[in-house]
Amino acid sequence: MSKYRVLVVDDESAIRDMLRMMLEIGEYECVEASNIFDAHRLMLDCRPDIVLLDWMLPGGNGLELLRRLKSSEVTRDTPVIMLTAKTTQDNIIQGLEVGADDYITKPFAPRELVARIKALLRRAQPREDGSVFEVGGLRLDVAARRAFIDQKPIDLGPTEFKLLHFFMSHPERAYTRSQILDHVWGTNVYVEERTVDVHIRRLRKIMQVPDSDHSRLIQTVRGTGYRFSVTG
C-alpha cells in the first residue's frame, strides 16, 4: 500500500469527500482541512507528502497559505497543486510564481489529478524516507530505520532517530532549539526547549562507542543551539 500522505485543503465538504474517496482508491492516505488555520497545523503535525490546495478559503485564500508554506524551511519542499475555478492566465501565473508546483482547474477529471499527483511525487524523489546518509563510519538508513557505526548497529529510540536524521540531512548549519523542535517534534507539540538538550545528550551517548566517538559531530553552538558538522 502507498505510504504517501495527501493533504486536501478545500472549504467544500463535497469536494473533500470526492477527493478522499478518489485518493483512498489509489491507496493514498488522506487528511483534510477546510480553512487556512487547520491546513497549516496539519502541514506541521502530519507532514504530508503533497498538498491539494483550493484558492478560495475561509479567513483568506490559498495563495496566502502557499506563500507561508514556501517561505518556511520546514514546509517549502512539499509539492503543492492548486485546485481552483479561477482560469485566467494571470491567476495561473500568480499561483506558479508564488510557488505552486502544478495547477488544475475545476471541474477536473479525477484520473488527470491522480496522474499529476504521481508525476509530482516522482519529481520530488529521492525523499528523505528512502535516503541513506553516511559520514565517516556513521550510517543512517532511513527506509530501514537503522543506524550503524563502523558497520555495527546502534540502538536509537524514535526521537533520537528523528534527531539524527534531521542533523545528517541538514549538515554544517547552526539551528536554535526552537528550530529543532519545529523540525523534529512539530510546532503543535508543546514541549520545552530543554527537551532538545535531553535528547541530544542521549543521542551523543549512543554515538560514543568503543574506539569510535561520533558524538563530536553534534556540536554545541554557544548562544545559538546545535550544528551537525564533520569539521571542528
Image (cartoon, grey):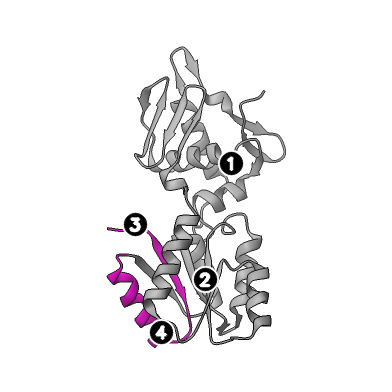
Q: Position of residue 104 (x, y in %)?
A: 51, 77
Q: CA distance from mark 3 to mark 2?
A: 19 Å
Q: Secondary structure at mark 3?
A: loop
Give the mark, 2 or 1, whose residue is nearer the N terminus: 2
Q: Is residue 23 above or below residue 55?
A: above
Query: Nearer the observer, disc 1 or disc 3?
Result: 3
Q: Is residue 182 above or below residue 151?
A: below
Q: Position of residue 193 (x, y in %)?
A: 58, 47
Give the mark, 3 or 4, whose residue is nearer the N terminus: 3
Q: Residue furthest top?
A: 211
Of the residues shown, which amino acid type is indicated by label 3? Lys
CB of mark 4 within 8 Å of CB of mark 1? no
Question: Which residue lies under the disc numbered 3?
Answer: 3
CB of mark 2 within 8 Å of CB of mark 1? no
Question: Which residue lies under the disc numbered 4?
Answer: 15
Query: Nearer the observer, disc 2 or disc 1?
Result: 2
Question: Which residue lies under the disc numbered 1?
Answer: 170
Of the residues shown, which amino acid type is indicated by label 1? His
Q: Which residues are magenta?
A: 1-27
Would you say residue 78 sits in the magenta stretch?
Answer: no
Between 41 and 97, the one lying in front of the other is 97
Q: Is residue 56 left or right of residue 94?
A: left
Question: Which residue lies under the disc numbered 2?
Answer: 81
Give the mark, 4 or 2, whose residue is nearer the N terminus: 4
Residue 183 seen in the figure: yes
Of the residues shown, which amino acid type is indicated by label 4? Ile
Q: Is residue 89 above or below residue 69?
A: below
Give the mark, 1 or 3, whose residue is nearer the N terminus: 3
CB of mark 3 within 8 Å of CB of mark 4? no
